[in-house]
Image (cartoon, rainbow, N blue to C red):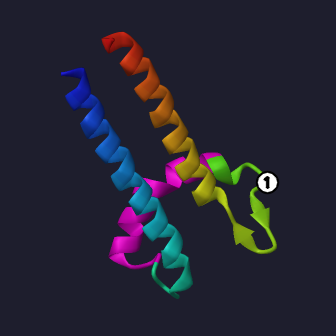
Amino acid sequence: MIITLFYYLNRLVYLYSILLVVYALMSWFPGAYQSKFGQILGRICEPFLDLFRRLPLQFGGLDFSVMAAILALNFAMNILQRILINLVY
């Protein structure tokens, strides 16, 4: 049961990571954030990205907050995986 729960949680984190990448790529297209799809993604992604936008992650006009957010998600999943492995075995 714990393994199944972890599997679905891992899939959700993977899906959220993809949504973050799509949201970041939308910045390349004018007016993409104002579309209905862009507004929905904004409501999903912005609260988490705002945590990383407070950090100095902008270099030369590029914003690396999405990359930091994805790395933080993966790091948290790795920590959770290690904790669950120790609980199961």
Residue 59 spot, x, y in % from top left: 80, 67
Residue sitting farthest toward the bottom:
30
Dominant SS type (magenta): helix
Q: Quadrant of the N terminus?
A: top left
Residue 44, located in which quarter of the rendered image?
bottom left
Q: State the residue in front, 50 or 25.
A: 25
Residue 19 spot, x, y in % from top left: 40, 61
Disc tally is 1
Magenta-span inclusion, residue 38: yes
User: Position of 36 compared to 55: left or right?
Assistant: left
Circle 1 packing at 10 Å, graded few (<14), some (14-19), many (20+), is: few
- Residue beneath disc 1: 56
**In this rendering, is residue 42 above or below 37?**
above
Residue sitting farthest toward the front:
89
**In this rendering, is residue 5 above or below 69?**
above
User: Position of 51 compared to 18: left or right?
Assistant: right
Q: State the residue in front, 32 or 79.
A: 79
Q: State the residue in front, 53 or 35.
A: 53
Magenta-span inclusion, residue 69: no
Callout 1: helix, strand or loop? loop
Q: Which residues are magenta?
A: 33-51
Residue 82 spot, x, y in % from top left: 45, 23
**In this rendering, is residue 81 above or below 53?**
above
Residue 48 spot, x, y in % from top left: 52, 48
User: Position of 5 compared to 53: left or right?
Assistant: left
Q: Residue at (74%, 49%) from the top-left corner?
A: 55
Q: Residue at (33%, 11%) from the top-left corner?
A: 89
Q: Residue at (36%, 11%) from the top-left corner?
A: 87
Q: Residue at (57%, 48%) from the top-left corner?
A: 71
Q: Amino acid at mark 1?
A: Pro
